[in-house]
Every structure is written in structure tokens, then in C-alpha cells.
Amino acid sequence: MATDARNDELERLAEALVDALGTDAVRRDETLARHTSLRIGGPADVLAVAETSGALQRAVALAWEHRVPLRVLGSGANVLVSDAGVRGLVVLNRARAIRFVGLDGDTDEGAPGVRAESGASLSTVARQSIRRGLAGLAWAATIPGTVGGAVVGNAGAWGGDVASTLVSASVLERGETVVEWPVELFEYTYRSSLVKRQAMPGLPPYVVLEAHFGLQRGDRGALEAQVADMVARRKASQPPGATCGSVFKNPHGDVSGRLIEVAGLKGTTRGNAEISTVHANFVVNHGGATAADVHALIALARREVEARSGIRLELEIQLIGDWEPGVGSQ
């Protein structure tokens, strides 16, 4: 839309969001660096904080109604937000309710499980499950990010993933209909789903509201020991500090970190961004790095790995916001 018309529509949307969510929940030109794990990102035209699933639904529905580009952001892990920021509405998903089902004294029927709103921390859900002696999500106890992001991106680690543990999820569809999707409807592949593949910049056709994970009775002590081992191994193999997680997907039969290391890129810097000396598939912001710095390292890693091995690395992180033509699709 033309600039004046776009600004008018943004203003109307901001007013509608204030009416729906309250003044404190809506901000203009909010810098997103404070809301991403990499501590990088320019301003959002409008930012709305959704503390409940109902607030999330209202904010998304208003964006659709006003035809304003929309992005739902959870913990801000696994994303690189451009220095130019994000046009339209960014909704910070803080809907974090967690409810266990199928336990002793629970009136719900069926096997043990947990229903968690999409803004809940995935690792928190996993650890609360373990405290109840429930197995099935131990693999998720060291994964940063939210339930919603995990469901959309088929997050996984330590031999487990969302595709193998999700029973169903409540999904808000265009037209403001909430539908319970069985796991099969997500058509999961490695680090991807139907929801992720069909999303267009600024126009998500679906928003995950809540997820239902299947669990089994287990030994709490053994599960806690398993998580302690995973935490120790992760601390030894991944860098501390501000990162966005694994930058690239692992190609079939190989590991991205190994390919980048073989290309001699460990420790390479652009500005205050560095390809980690601990794990080459991580980029660390040592303070004051820009999205352009990080993207320059991403492009370099791709070029060098492809030149040496013939393998074209695919991004696991998502590029969000205003980028130069062609960059956001890489």
C-alpha cells in the first residue's frame, strides 16, 4: 500500500489493539533487539504483547482485518531480524498456560499428556513433565524457544522432535476459526511443517495457539539424570552468549558445523559478530553486532562450503523484516 495509506491503516490498527488489549500492551516503533536471543533487530511499526491465548487471537484477527503484515514472535530464538526492522504488526506471544491431562484425579480421559499454550517455553514444559515423572519430552529440556515456534519448525534434539511427540494442536485459521489439527495435518519434515512452508512474509495463514503432547509414565530420577547429561554436553559443545541457535540445517549425511569448520571459518568475524570457535554452526553477537554483520557471515559460510564440498547449506533460522531483494528467501 502507499506510504500514507499504510500509515493510516497502522494507526487504525494500533487504536483497535489498544481498545482490545489495553494501552500498556501496544507500542509503536519498538526496537526488536531486546526481544531476540541474538540481541539484534530494528523497530517494529507496531508491537502488541499478548499475555493470553485470547489476546493472541484478538491481535492476529485485527491484523488480518486491517490487512496489515503480521509476525508472531515467541522467545526470539532461531530468528535474525533485519536492521531496518519489521513493517506492520509484531505480536509478542506471552500466552504461557500449561495444563497436564490424564493424570491421577484428572477428569479428562485418555493417556497422560500436556497441553501448553504456544507462548510457553518448550524447555519449561519438558522440565515440568519430568518433575511429574512423565517421559516423552526429555529431548526438549535444553531447547530454547516456545511451544508455538517448535510446532511450526518441528524442533528437535537428542533423537526426538515435535513430529514424534505431538498429538494435536489448536490452530487459528484465516476467517478466525480455531481448529484442532491432528499431528498428521502438519505434514512434518526435517525442521519444517505445512504451516512453515505455506507462510508468506507478513501473511501467515495459520497461527498455533496451543499444543497437546503425548507422554508416558517414566522414572523421574532417570529422566533428570538424562537431562543433566544433555545440559552438560550442550554446555561443552555450544557457545554461551547471544546467539540465535543453529544457523543452518544439517544436510543429509553430514553436519553443518563440521562443513563450516573444514572451510576454515571458525572464529571469522564481521563487526562484532563471530562464527563461534566452539561450534561453527553458531554465530555469536559479542555486543553491538548488526543483522548485516551476521548475514555477511551466513553468506560467507554458504559460499565457502559450497565451493569446497558442493553442498548448499539451508537456513534453519528465519530472516525477518526488511532485507535487500532476494535476501529474505535465502
Image: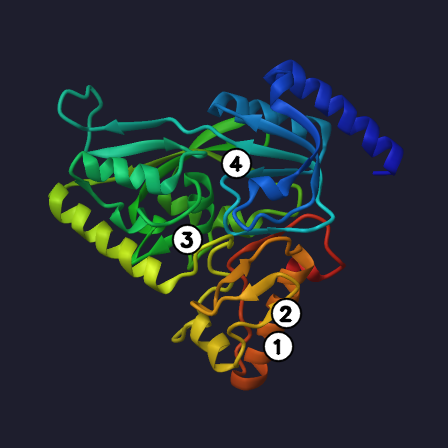
Residue 307 can be seen in this image:
yes
Badge 1 or badge 4: first in the primary sequence: 4
What is the distance, in whole Å, between disc 2 and disc 1 at their CAs?
A: 6 Å
Q: Which residue is mark 4?
A: 207
Badge 2 or badge 4: first in the primary sequence: 4
The residue under label 1 is which amino acid type?
Arg
- Asked if residue 166 lies left or right of residue 77, the reply is left
What is the distance, in whole Å, between disc 2 and disc 4 at their CAs?
A: 30 Å
- Asked if residue 37 lies left or right of residue 186, the reply is right
Q: Which residue is mark 1?
A: 303
The residue under label 3 is which amino acid type?
Tyr
Q: From the viewer's perspective, is the residue at label 2 or at label 4 nearer?
A: 2
What is the distance, in whole Å, between disc 3 and disc 2 at their CAs?
A: 27 Å
Q: Which residue is mark 3?
A: 188
Marker disc for residue 79: none
Residue 126, x across and y down, in percent: 29, 41
Residue 45, x across and y down, in percent: 73, 35
The residue under label 4 is which amino acid type?
Val
Place residue 233 in its image quadrant: bottom left
**Above or below, comparing residue 187 to residue 73 in the picture:** below
Q: From the viewer's perspective, is the residue at label 1 or at label 3 nearer?
A: 1
